């Protein structure tokens, strides 16, 4: 049905239509501004005010990589440092997370992809960070760059000890066999020295940088301790033990353990006729004791496994030859005891809790078969064994508040399983499972109360209850409107 309108009605429509047209134009303009702003933010032309160039930290596309560095106390800073990226194809940045819930306080500028192979090092209010052949010093409160130092070579991959803070300085060991010491305030070179070989570790002994390196024109190695301020050689320690005309000396792979509380340096070496253990005083460079055991009587290791000796409670625990035994060295007198023997497993001591030693046992006939053992330190007996699930792609275990905690990344579907084990029986007291969105476990850090796991996102495991939770970025449902 058509509705006829009078001439007065048509005249009133002119004004009304004009007002409506203006309103439409205003709304359209406002919409255009909104769309333009959204586009600009997405293209980072109006990015948030961050130190680097990453987008909003609350974005669900942010991912965490590598080990977490908990910041507890230190110059009043509390939080976490972790490498992050938008996705696997985006550049890395170092991010500072804090608050409840966790949020990004700052991001560094984009970093070289190899930076993740060397964890950042904290000293008071500064974070030292590898970036290609450069060392960066970032101020912890706001992430601003304090200084950048060109090293001329990269820090060796995987060398967690190759950046060491000193009093008013920082020592760096690079792959070109150079030991450099830089000023903490401005990164200016203080001194450097060329080494005969590239050591595997950089130690700090009584406040001074030290390395184990070969002695030129000999087959021997020595621990060289340098004066932190001047770079002069404070002392050279060359352990050796001799029996039946055979001289044993350390190799570059031989373990060196430093106990700062006792100011003691321990050397473990020997692979021809005897195994040798020695204790030296860090302050004087004098030998305290020397102990030797014949290889025919004691299964002393002739090559050192990835997991090194464990110094705990006045004892050094180590895996014997081929890992098929456990040895214990008393740090008071150097006496050596064979704790446990097995022919079917390769053993690595992981952590001690009271009278129980947690041991990783890998079946020699099935390298995919892992177990945890509890070894009674009083009797030397294996009290329990805990098998790792066949569907596990990665796992870790450590001391917990009420025993031991085992975290396993299970597949099909991906999920994190956490067990709190009774330390005496090895049975799960609690078990919790949490779905995860990734199968790439790239970092683990332990504190007294929390385990931080980097599995695409960042997860926290309460070591009192065993309850895991995704803490950054928060799961999508926690961001959605209620």
Image: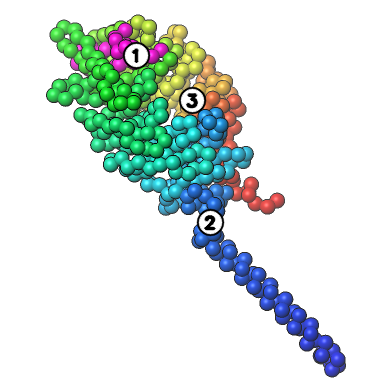
Q: Is residue 7 visible?
A: yes
* CB within 8 Å, label 3 to label 2: no
Q: What residue appears at the point 66 percent right and 74 percent down from the top-left corner? A: 28
Describe the element under mark 2 as helix, strand or loop: loop
Q: Nearer the viewer, residue 481 or 302?
A: 481
Residue 330 position in % (x across, y down): 37, 9
List the residue tagged with mark 3. Answer: 398
The stretch drawn in magenta includes residue 275:
yes
Q: Nearer the viewer, residue 190 or 434?
A: 190
Q: Is residue 184 above or below residue 476?
A: above
Image quarter of residue 202? top left
Dot in front, 3 or 1: 1
* Magenta-highlighted residues: 262-288
List the residue tagged with mark 1. Answer: 283
The stretch drawn in magenta includes residue 50:
no
Q: Is residue 89 left or right of residue 196?
A: right
Chain-order first, disc 3 or disc 2: 2
Q: What residue appears at the point 32 percent right and 32 percent down from the top-left corner? A: 190
Q: What residue appears at the point 49 percent right and 46 percent down from the top-left corner? A: 107
Residue 462 position in % (x across, y down): 58, 30
Residue 47 tag number: 2
Query: What crowding class fits label 1: few (fewer than 14 Cα within 10 Å), some (14-19), or many (20 or more)?
Result: few
Q: Is residue 191 above or below residue 340?
A: below
Residue 381 tag number: none
Q: Is residue 415 visible?
A: no
Q: Nearer the viewer, residue 284 or 313?
A: 284
Q: How many marks?
A: 3
Dot in front, 3 or 2: 2
């Amino acid at each position: 049905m058509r509705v006829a309108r009078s001439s007065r009605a048509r005249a009133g429509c002119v004004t009304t239509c004009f007002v409506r047209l203006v309103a439409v134009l205003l709304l359209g303009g406002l919409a255009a501004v909104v769309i333009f702003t959204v586009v600009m933010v997405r293209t980072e032309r109006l990015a948030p005010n961050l130190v680097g160039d990453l987008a909003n930290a609350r974005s669900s596309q942010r991912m965490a990589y590598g080990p977490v560095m908990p910041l507890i106390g230190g110059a009043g800073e509390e939080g976490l440092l972790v490498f992050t990226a938008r996705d696997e194809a985006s550049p890395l940045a170092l991010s500072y997370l804090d608050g409840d819930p966790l949020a990004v306080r700052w991001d560094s500028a984009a970093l070289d992809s190899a930076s993740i192979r060397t964890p950042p090092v904290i000293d008071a209010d500064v974070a030292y960070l590898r970036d290609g052949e450069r060392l960066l010093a970032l101020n912890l409160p706001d992430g601003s760059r304090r200084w950048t130092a060109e090293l001329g070579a990269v820090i060796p991959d995987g060398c967690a000890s190759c950046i060491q803070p000193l009093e008013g300085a920082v020592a760096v060991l690079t792959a070109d066999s150079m030991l450099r010491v830089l000023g903490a305030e401005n990164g200016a070179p203080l001194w450097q020295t060329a080494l005969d070989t590239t050591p595997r570790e950089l130690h700090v002994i009584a406040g001074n940088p030290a390395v184990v390196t070969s002695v030129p024109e000999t087959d021997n190695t020595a621990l060289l301790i340098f004066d932190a301020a001047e770079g002069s050689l404070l002392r050279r320690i060359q352990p050796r033990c001799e029996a039946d005309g055979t001289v044993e000396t350390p190799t570059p792979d031989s373990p060196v353990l430093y106990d700062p509380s006792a100011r003691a340096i321990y050397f473990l070496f020997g692979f021809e006729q005897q195994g040798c253990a020695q204790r030296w005083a860090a302050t004087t460079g004098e030998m305290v004791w020397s102990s030797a055991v014949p290889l025919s009587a004691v299964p002393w290791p002739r090559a050192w496994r990835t997991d090194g000796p464990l110094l705990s409670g006045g004892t050094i625990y180590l895996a014997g030859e081929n890992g098929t035994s456990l040895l214990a060295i008393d740090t008071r007198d150097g006496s050596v005891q064979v704790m446990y023997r097995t022919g079917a497993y390769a053993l690595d001591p992981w952590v001690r809790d009271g009278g129980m030693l947690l041991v990783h046992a890998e079946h020699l006939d099935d390298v995919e078969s892992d177990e945890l053992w509890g070894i009674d330190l009083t009797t030397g007996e294996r009290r329990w064994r805990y098998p790792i699930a066949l569907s596990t792609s990665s796992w870790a275990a450590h001391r917990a508040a009420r025993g031991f905690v085992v975290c396993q990344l299970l597949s099909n579907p991906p999920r994190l399983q956490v067990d709190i084990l009774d330390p005496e029986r090895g049975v799960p007291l609690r078990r919790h499972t949490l779905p995860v969105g990734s199968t790439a476990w790239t970092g683990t850090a332990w504190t007294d109360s929390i385990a931080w796991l980097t599995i695409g996102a960042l997860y926290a495991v309460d070591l009192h209850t065993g309850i895991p939770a995704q803490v950054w970025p928060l799961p999508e449902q926690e961001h959605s409107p209620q």
